[in-house]
Amino acid sequence: MTKNTRPAPSARTRIRRIAEKANYETQMLYDIIDEAYVCNLAFNAGDSTHCIPTACWRDGHYLYIHGSNGSRMVKALLSGIQTSIAITHIDALVLAKSAFNHSMNYRSAVIYGTFEAVEGDEHKAAALDVFMDKIAAGRKHQARPGNAQELAATTVLRISLDEAAAKVSNKQAPEDNVEDLDLPVWAGLLPMKVTRGEPIAANNVAVSTPDYVRDWAE
Ligand SMILES: Cc1cc2nc3c(=O)[nH]c(=O)nc-3n(C[C@H](O)[C@H](O)[C@H](O)COP(=O)(O)OP(=O)(O)OC[C@H]3O[C@@H](n4cnc5c(N)ncnc54)[C@H](O)[C@@H]3O)c2cc1C
């Protein structure tokens, strides 16, 4: 159960269903975004609603995305339409004695609002540097920065994190019905996490291995 020091920032971010899992703390929101490489972004365009996965990163109180100028998603978001973004981390599968009581432990965030374009090559490059450093700390000083043509072809957008909420489920055990407790069925948690594999080098003649590559695998 979460003790919130802040209220939900808006009516549409107030978690109603299993409200005790609501977390409106800014740090929880930041942690969920910072651990994510991808968000799922929903918007209306044309005659349909779309939900598109795309890379994301955070700088200050904004979530950033980028894309080709020609992308439908980018063009739609630049028109100022409302969007909703979801980010999810699964921490465990929760296996109960009954099928009905199965669940998952998770940390998720939902963000609402409108995107704005990051204008000017200098600001765009700075935002993309933060993305490079999210991929690997120090990488922005090593990879060739985007040139004028590459920057011109790329749109960088950001959305304020003012209207967002997190939901956290962190059960220590499944919640079984009393009458099910003696059933001869295994119950418990199957923890899960994203793991880092061994790096696979490519075309690295006369390049020393940076620390973030050497230390990558778990
Ligand atoms: C990994 C995972 C698996 C899930 N599986 C199921 C499932 O199988 N069935 C099911 O019904 N639900 C599932 N949920 C919960 C689901 O995300 C919703 O919270 C739930 O369905 C209630 O939806 P609602 O629109 O009625 O919520 P409401 O409480 O009415 O939503 C109000 C507002 O709360 C916020 N909100 C709602 N859910 C979340 C969330 N998860 N994270 C952050 N903010 C949120 C949004 O701003 C939303 O507009 C799962 C969640 C996760 C992360």
Image: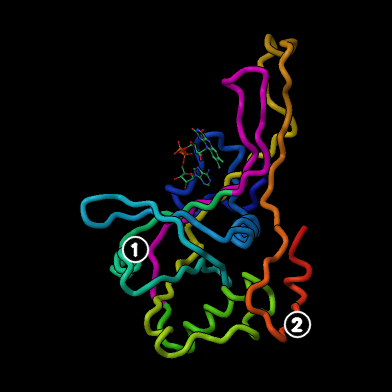
Ligand 1 closer than 8 Å to label 1 CB: no
Q: Main secondary structure of the magenta part?
A: strand
Residue interval drawn in magenta: 89-117
Helix, strand or loop status at disc 2? loop
Q: Is residue 185 above or below residue 137?
A: above
Q: Position of residue 1 (x, y in %)?
A: 68, 39
Q: What element does badge 1 sit on?
A: helix
Please name the residue that numbered disc 2 is placed on: 208
Residue 130 versus residue 175 in the image, above or below: below
Q: Residue at x 62, y 35 (%)?
A: 104
Tell me the residue that label 1 is attached to.
73
Front residue of 149 and 160: 149
Position of 57 relative to 179 (above/below): below
Q: Nearer the viewer, mark 2 or mark 1?
A: 2
Q: Nearer the viewer, residue 161 or 10?
A: 161
Q: Residue at 73% across / 20% down in the picture? A: 186
Residue at screen point 69% across, 75% down: 137
